Amino acid sequence: PSSSSSSSSSFTILPHHSWLSVGEQNTMKALVAQARPFLLLFGLATFLEIIICPQQVAHLLSHPPLRRSRSSVSPQTRTTRWAASRWLHVGRGWDQMTTATRKQHRYPQLQQQQLGDRKCHAVDAEAGRSDPEEVVVQIVTSKGCKFCKRTKEAMSQRGIPFEELSVSNDPSLLASLSSVSGLKTVPQVFVGGAFVGDGEATISLLVKSDNDDQSEGGGRKSFFSAADKSKILPAPTIEKLRVGDAKEKIVALAYRDVSEQILISWDKLKTVFITPTDAHPELSRNEVLEALIHQHKHLPEKDDHVDIEGMLEELIHSNLMAETKGGKLIFTTNPPPPKRGEAINSCFEWKGHVLPPSQISELLQRGMSQLLDSHGREGGKAIDYKALAKDPAFGDIVRLSHQLAKSDPAVLSRDERMAFYINIYNVLIVHAMTARGPPPNLAARMLFYGEAKYVIAGNEYSCNDIENGVLRGNRPSPASVQLPFTKPTGPFKGGDPRLSQVISPPDPRIHFALNCGAKSCPAIRVYTGNALEMGLQAATESFCADESNVNFDRNSNTLTLSKIFQWYRPDFGSDLQLQELLVNGVTGKRGISLKNFFEEAPKPKLVFADYNWDLNEA
C-alpha cells in the first residue's frame, strides 16, 4: 500500500519481475515459450468443445468435477475410471450419474442410508423423455451368468451407471420378477423400476441408441424411453434383490464356531507359511508352535500364561488346520492337491459341527458362482482357472467341501435332494478343474468325469455317479461302452448303498442345469429345494433361448437341436413329450412360432448341431 496520506486507496506497482533475478526471469520466459504451443492447442480444443457441445460444457461448469478416492465409491456404482485429466473429458461420466450416485461420491458416509432410502422414479415413456438425474438403471442378475456379464459390460462401456440386483441368494424371487416382466430368466433390466427387457433386448436398444442422433442426448433417450411404466417392480422386491456377498455368508456360517482370537492367529500363520512358491505347505508341529510363540512374544508379562499348545489344538479342533496321515499339519483352505483317484475333499477329516446338507450345497454353489463371476473372461464364456485357484475365497470353498463327507442327504426330500446334487455336480466340476487342472484333450476329459469325485456321507460320488446314477435314475452313460449280448446298466449295482439316493423317475430338465465345463454347456445357477421347479424352468427357458440349442426352419421343415437331446434321448420321452417341453421352454413370439411349426409339421426333419467340447478355460 502507498505511504501517501491521501484518503483514496492506492497501491505501489512493483517493477515487472522485480522479485526475480535476471537468470530466473530468463528461465521463466523460456518455460512460457515452450508451453505456448500446448496452451494454444488446449485453447483450440476448448473452443471446439464449446461450439460442438455447449450444453455439456454448461452442465460441467454447474457440476464441477471432484477428486475422489477409489475406496469411497461402491462397487455397484463404480462404472467409470476417473483420470487425472478429468477436465479434458467434458460431459463424460459425471453428467450421466444419478443424483443418488453423485451424493455417494460426495458423501460416502451416507452410502448405506442412500441405498436403503433410494426412491425409484418411473420413466415418462409416453412423452419419450427421461431425466438422467432421476433415473436409476437396475439389472437383475445371477452370479456366473455369462448373459448378465455381457449386459453389464454393455452398460459400463457406454458410461451408464447401474445398480446390480441378484437372485442368487434367493432363487424364489424369480416368481416376483416373473409376475412383473413375464420372464423367468436373467438378466432383466429396469429403468426407474419400470421393465425394459432381457439382456438381448437391452443390448439391441443400446446399439440402436448408439446409431441415433446424439444431439441433446437423443441416443440415450432411445434406451430410457423404452421402459414400460405399466410393469413396475415393487419396492419390497427391490430390497430383497439387493446384492449379497456369498463369501460373507460362507465365512459367517463355516467359521461361526471359531473364536476371533484363533482366526487372527490362523491368518497370521497363513501369511508366514503360504507363499507363491509353496501354496500348500506341510508343516511339523514344532514349526507351528514356534510361529505361535513368535506371535505372542510381544505380550506383557501378565499375559505370559497363554497356552500355545492349547491354541494349536484349538486350531485343529476348529478345522482351520488338520493333521495328515504322515503327522504333518496343513491349512484346511490350502491342502496338498489330491492324488489321482482320490476324492478331492478327502485331504483331511472334518471334526465337530456339520451344517445341514442343503445349506452346504447352496453355500458352495453361491461361493463358486461368485468366483466364476469374478474370474470369467470373454463375456463370461471362459474361466481363468489359474487366477481362481489363487483367490482366497476358493480356499473357503475347499474347506467347506470337506463337510460333505459327514453330511447325509438321505434326510432330504426329493426336490431338496435333486437341488443338492445339481449344485454339488456343478461345484465338483469347477473344483476338480481348478485343483488338478483342466483335462488337456477329449480322451482325458472322458476319464475326468469318472475320476473327479467327492466323498458324501462316507461314499464316493464321481461326476458320472451324480449325473447318471443319482439324477438320471441310475441309467447308463451315453459314453459307456456296451459289451455284446449284455444289457446296459447304470453305475450303481445291487447292494450299493448309493442306490438310496437315486431319483426316479428323473426330470429331463436337469440337462439344462448341469454344466460339465465345456463351452456348449448351460449356464450355472444356484438351486434350492423350495424353488426347484422355478429354477429348472428358468434353466430350460435360458437354454432354449439360445438358437444354437433350439432352432427351426419352416421352409425346410427342419428342427435343429443341441446334441444333448440326442445323447439323452430316452430321458425326454416320446416325440410328443419332447415337443411339449420345447414349446414350454421357448418363450415369447418365438415360442408361438414354434408351436405353430409343430402343428403344421408334427414330424419335422431332426438335425443335431455340433457340440463345442472346447473347455471354458481362459
Image (spheres, rainbow, N blue to C red):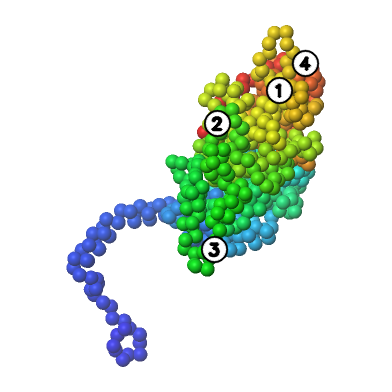
- The nearer-to-camera label among 4 and 2 is 2
Q: Mark on residue 339? A: 2
Q: Would residue 8 appear left or right of 615 to someone viewing this image?
A: left
- The nearer-to-camera label among 3 and 4 is 3
Mark 4 element type: loop
Residue at point 77%, 45% (across, down): 176
Q: Distance between the residues labelled 3 and 2?
A: 42 Å
- The image shows residue 359, relative to residue 436, as above or below, that is below
Residue at point 44%, 56% (across, down): 87
- The image shows residue 87, relative to residue 334, as above or below, that is below
Choose between 24 and 478: the one closer to the eye. 478
- Residue 71: x and y in percent read 52, 57
Residue at point 20%, 70% (across, down): 21
Q: Mark on residue 603? A: 4
Residue type, mark 1 in image: Pro
- The nearer-to-camera label among 3 and 1 is 3
- The nearer-to-camera label among 1 and 4 is 1
Residue bearing the label numbered 3 = 305
